Image: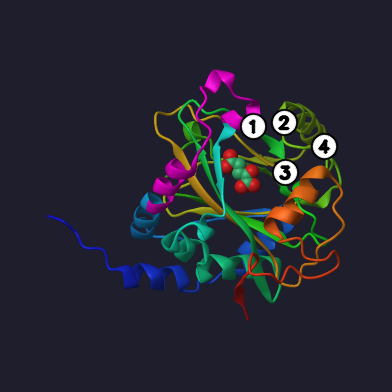
Amino acid sequence: METTIDKTTLLNELDAYYIVSPEAIAFYRQNGYVKLKHVLSPEVLAYYGDILTDLVFRLNTLIKPMEERTTYERAFLQIMNLWREDEQAKEFVFSKRLAKIATDLMGVEGVRLYHDQALYKEPSGGITPWHADQFYWPLASPNTVTVWTPLQDTPMEMGPLAFAEGSQHVEIGRDIEISDDSEKILSDTLQEQNFNVHDTPFELGEVSYHAGWTFHRAGPNVSDRPRKVMTMIYMDKDQIVMQPRNEYQVADHATWLNSVPIGSKPQSELNPILFSY
Ligand SMILES: O=C(O)CCC(=O)C(=O)O
């Protein structure tokens, strides 16, 4: 029998507030990430998962065989700002539920979207090397956070996201782009400095939030299913754009921040406020 999807129920769920426990907030601030279960229902994930997946495969241009790809290209198909491509993708990306959690974890008044991105690790896709995201962003304060939302359960063989606990507090390796070098150098340094690495599967409905300076990586996808993940990067709504410090930040300033003046808030239509108290 065909089941009918009640769209209003799905939209209500995307906007319904999730109460973030004081323990989860304390954990995030200490460790630079937190994993939360039962944030999204199987129904929301199935419905929006299909929409996001169709978009990823429609917009993807990376079609060369795995053997010819760089380490970065082997890690995932990366399709950005899906909210600008499709009204239903926008419903998911603009979820107040997910944006409020980001707000509460950072302890700010509200958050803007930096950009979204789908990260699909294909079967036989390689590792995501150790890196910290904020290396790429010309943003003045560390109040940035990414929600990593798997669209299916993600066992170890699919390459779930792993985190070096507390690594956002130390100013090591902040000038290293994601690469084979970052994997080697950061893995050695994090080990030498005794950082605990949290690497566990994600249940269906579980999501993680990690701070912009938290080092993270993912293993290869050795399963026969694609590891489908949608992410949204949030920043404090009062975040300030700073002078870019590298070529990636110059590019991000133009692409994701609409080239707003250095020293101003990113107030253009590219960076909407998604939740505010
Ligand atoms: O999905 C992955 O493998 C990497 C994700 C990541 O680096 C991020 O969301 O910041």
> Alpha carbon of mark 4 to alpha carbon of mark 2: how far?
21 Å
Tell me which label, 4 or 3, sits earlier in the chain.
4
Is residue 81 shown above or below 186? below
Secondary structure mostly taken by the magenta-highlighted segment of the chain: helix
Q: Nearer the viewer, mark 3 or mark 1?
A: 1
Callout 4 amino acid: Gln
Q: CA distance from mark 1 to mark 4?
A: 26 Å
Q: Which residue is under mark 4?
A: 193
- The answer to whether the residues at label 1 and label 2 have Cβ atoms under 8 Å apart is yes
Upstream in sequence: badge 2 or badge 3? 2
Residue 220 placement, left or right of 256: left
- Whether the residues at callouts 2 and 3 have beta carbons within 8 Å, the answer is no
Q: CA distance from mark 3 to mark 1?
A: 16 Å
Q: CA distance from mark 4 to mark 3?
A: 13 Å
The residue at label 2 has a CB less than 8 Å from ligand 1: no
Q: Which residue is mark 2?
A: 179
